[in-house]
Image (cartoon, rainbow, N blue to C red):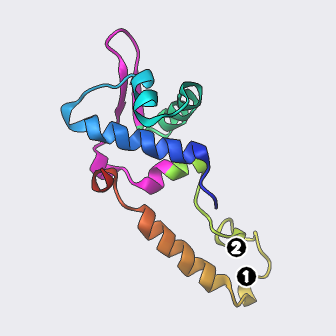
Amino acid sequence: MKLTMQGEYAIRAMLELSREYSGGKLISAKELATRQDIPPVFLTKILSVLARAELIVNQRGSRGGIRLVKYPSEITIQDVVEAIEGPFKLNMCLGVTGACDRKPGCKVHWIWHRAQEAMLKELSVTLDKVV
């Protein structure tokens, strides 16, 4: 799996929102785009996906803005990446059962499995630990 620019931007946006979380401050999409140097049109699409994943809320109106739905200590980098990129699977044999008919006798399957577990462990860090 390769992290796309959309995934990178989503992580940067979520880290910026986590910096503002304790004050309860709402940040406008324009301000967020400026602070993190994210193209505004691209950010709008990312924010829509993050809202559908229930990681952020976008309050409309003159006093509106964006904020995290949960504490930064309850949101992992994995949550953000998977909201944008989909479930993390290093190889097809680690995904849906039956995706690889070689799995029962495969000598490499456990290498893929251990590598994926190591990656998921690293991605399990919460936003508050990164900020």
- Residue 93 circle label: 2
Q: Nearer the viewer, residue 34 or 103?
A: 34
Horizontal relation, residue 103 to residue 10: left or right: right
Do tag 1 and tag 2 residues touch (Cβ < 8 Å)? yes
Residue 55 in percent (x, y) is at 42, 40
Q: Nearer the viewer, residue 102 or 116?
A: 116
Q: Name the element at disc 1.
A: helix
Label 1 crowd bin: few (<14), some (14–19), many (20+), radius 10 Å? some
Q: Which residues are magenta?
A: 56-80
The N terminus, quarter of image: bottom right
The vertical placement of 41 against 10, above or below, is above
Label 2 crowd bin: few (<14), some (14–19), many (20+), radius 10 Å? some
Q: Mark 1 highlights which residue? A: 103
Q: Name the element at disc 2.
A: helix
Name the quadrant containing residue 97.
bottom right
Q: Earlier in the sequence, mark 1 or mark 2?
A: 2
